[in-house]
Image: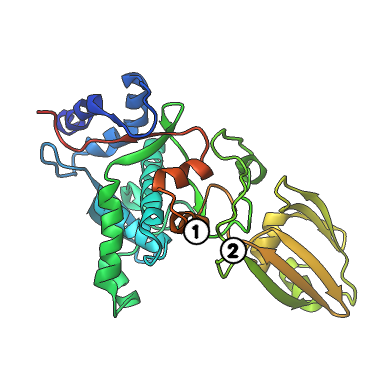
Amino acid sequence: MVMWGPFLSYYLPMRKLIIAHRIKIITLGLILIALIGLWRFACRSDTEFEWGNEPYILLYLHEKDQTAKLKFEEYLVGAVAAEMPASFAPEALKAQAVCARTYAVKKLIEQHAYPNQADLSDDINNCQAYISPAEFKRAHPRHHEELLARIQQAVAETRGEIMLSGGEPIDAVYHSTCGGQTEDVGEVWLQALPYLTSVKCKYCSDSKHYSTVQVFSFQQIESHMGLNQDENLQIDILKTTSSGRIKELSINNKIISGEQFRRQLNLPSNWLRFETDPGKLTIKSRGYGHGVGMCQYGANGMAQDGAGYQQILEHYYQDIDFIKISYDVLE
């Protein structure tokens, strides 16, 4: 049986949206579209609600094959803790909190089919990571209270805030280190989006992943790539993206994508340069991750340089609006 009370407790507060960046009227119809996903899990008969409280979600823990019931903002604390170092600057943590919240809301709207009828998952292959307070304590035995408090503060100070483009939550993807320039989403996942274009980034050079050098024997390369053993290795870059990342290459006449090459060799990124010597291949990588959206180390660098979290987000996501979802009932 559908429970309309919980839905109304979220629909009515939407009339009191706070536009946090541009003074711009966004129609209630567009906002309602952006909140269909919240309706989905607000109306579930197995979800407990109190009038005016934030919703619970069911999170699928893929390694345990279990679900955990969490308040939405409580879940976000664990998502930020798993995705960004807690030692990062406060404004970077706030930027990550808004990304994580926006990303989760979009997933809820899209109604992905997670195991055990869960709303979200902690599997990074199809959602974002999550760490429980107990797991966080084990990972940071000496300063876990102080570090977790930093993340809780970042989530609390951005409570309910998400990013929109065209009246809908954006796909707020992010990565560790861009290496000096982010990637256009159309170069990675084919679908172009106006808010996920390539931008310069001069703030992530402190990342240990900014530049990486790895050396492979020809035999290792051929084994990983499923090639016939050969004393020689011929590798040619065929196509690159606008930022310089490898889109397509040929290795001993086998044509593969740069992303496939990266995954099969477990490389940090597909922004690569090659040096061949007798029997070995040296691979120089820039950055870590797919390179699309917010560069996390870049966000930290911007925060250390004095940028606020909305400035950071506006740098990596173009022409966006900020709104706050109110969890409180209008009085």
Q: Nearer the viewer, residue 299 or 216?
A: 299
Residue located beneath label 2 in the image:
205
Image height of 24 relative to 48, above or below: above
Residue 225 lies left or right of residue 181; in this view the side is right
How far is disc 2 from disc 1 in space, using C-alphas? 9 Å
Residue 189 appears anywhere in the view: yes
Residue at 73 percent across and 52 percent down: it is: 244
Residue 252 lies left or right of residue 330; in this view the side is right
Q: Position of residue 321 (x, y in %)?
A: 41, 32
Residue 134 appears anywhere in the view: no
Q: Nearer the viewer, residue 310 or 41?
A: 310
The answer to which of marks 2 and 1 sits earlier in the sequence is 2
Residue located beneath label 1 in the image:
301
Residue 45 lies left or right of residue 331; in this view the side is right
Is there a contact, CB below 8 Å, between mark 2 and mark 1?
A: yes
Density class for disc 2 (Cα within 10 Å; few <14, some 14-19, many ≥20) is: some
Q: Nearer the viewer, residue 294 or 219?
A: 294
Q: Position of residue 221 (x, y in %)?
A: 76, 72
**Quadrant of the frame with the N terminus:** top left
Residue at 72 percent across and 68 percent down: it is: 284
For badge 2, the amino acid type reads Ser
For badge 1, the amino acid type reads Gly
Q: How is the image coloured?
A: rainbow
